[in-house]
Image (cartoon, rainbow, N blue to C red):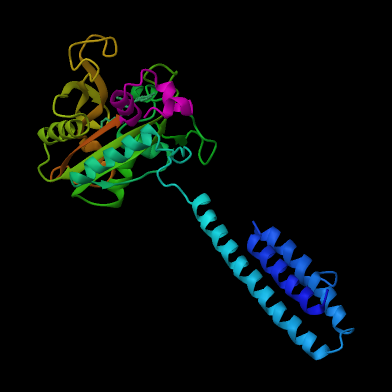
Amino acid sequence: MTFVDDTRRFTDDAVGAARGAASLDDLEEQERLHLKSKASTHGLLKERIKREDDRAAAGRLLNEARVEVERAFAARRDELERAARAESMVRDRIDLTVGGGEYRRGHLHPVTRIWRELEDVFVGLGYKVAEGPEVELDWYNFEALNFPPGHPARAMQDTLYVRLGEPEQVLLRTHTSPVQVRTMEAQKPPIYVVAPGRVFRRDTLDARHSPVFHQIEGLAVDEGITLGDLLGTIEAFIHALFGPNINARFLPSFFPFTEPSVEFAMTCVFCEGAGCTVCSKTGWVELGGAGMVDPAVFEAVDIDPERYSGFAFGFGIDRVAQLLYGIDHVKNVWDGDVRFLRQF
Ligand code: FA5
């Protein structure tokens, strides 16, 4: 076989192999066999040039053949790469219609939610939000609120004392009412504030009582405030939270820092007033206490009781959460069991 024939065959075989390559790997293998190594057909022909009579002509011929073969491999590579890209676009496409893996979002604790809703209701009525410390002085928690030492009403709000400062003068606050005193010390009327927060009592755990719970305090001090304003405000918030079919009821009560004092209840949401086990068949559930600010409290904070009058109220946030969500035992609110909390 002459050099020319062999070169012709090299070209035909190599171009055929390039066109017939089924994959990029196959193409590479064929390229190595025909073109790339010393042992390839092209490599062997190149060796033979030295032995040809007309080396220049042989060299030129092989060069032309190599260019043609290279072009065939490049063209096939281009085709195969394009096909691979098209295939991967189909294979790797993200199908946005397929539902994703479940992503569970957390949510606010029911008490936090009610806390914030209550703030919103009162801010809507023109109140500001105030805060006070959870570790409180006897003066703010009791004394300035007209509970002198030894007063029997103190026993109803027994708490933990903290070993700090004077003995029995620092305690975990038993209600949010001390924020009334702190607010009236810091600012003069007109005052319209609500103070939500955590409070502590030595109460035994039962369906509606927990040793740690939350209250929201309200205080309005201005000229000409009446008991009617208090009753209207409480009714407004109950309607805002529970809807127009739920009513407020007021009964006379006693608190050392309000005079007159009332206890307020709302229609039982479970039976809408018909009477059920939750409300002990009365149709009403107690929410909190309220009253007109006692002149003795105004004197303790240097506000003139002849000029100003005011009302205050305080009720349990946990209790509102229980009523709103139908939680039968307050312990469920504090167990921290996510299987329970997930329901709200
Ligand atoms: C008070 O704490 C007064 N400071 C309320 C007040 C404020 C009266 C302003 C006048 C003016 P009382 O002890 O009744 O009052 O508690 C008020 C509400 O807190 C109760 O009606 C109840 O809703 C809630 N509460 C009381 N003790 C507990 C408890 N252990 N666990 C959960 N909620 C409680």
| In-front residue for pair 111/298 | 111
Q: Residue at x 87, y 79 (%)?
A: 47
Q: Tell whether position 318 is magenta.
A: yes
Horizontal side of residue 306 vs 299, given as left or right: left
Q: Which residues are magenta?
A: 316-344
Residue 210 percent coordinates (x, y): 42, 23
Question: Magenta span: helix, strand or loop, mainly?
Answer: helix
Q: Tell whether position 55 is magenta.
A: no
Q: Residue at x 17, y 23 (%)?
A: 250
Horizontal side of residue 93 vs 238, given as left or right: right
Horizontal side of residue 220 vs 133, given as left or right: left
Residue 229 shows in the view: yes
- Please determine whether, in this image, residue 12 is positioned above or below residue 128: below
| In-front residue for pair 236/203 | 236
* Quadrant, the N terminus: bottom right
Q: Quadrant of ligand 1?
A: top left
Residue 272 percent coordinates (x, y): 19, 17
- Please determine whether, in this image, residue 298 is positioned above or below residue 151: below
Q: Which quadrant of the structure image shows residue 163?
A: top right
What is the number of callouts on the image? 0
Residue 70 percent coordinates (x, y): 68, 74
Instruction: Give the residue at the far front of this rendering.
Output: 1
Q: Residue at x 55, y 63 (%)?
A: 82
| In-front residue for pair 233/180 | 233
Q: Residue at x 66, y 77 (%)?
A: 68
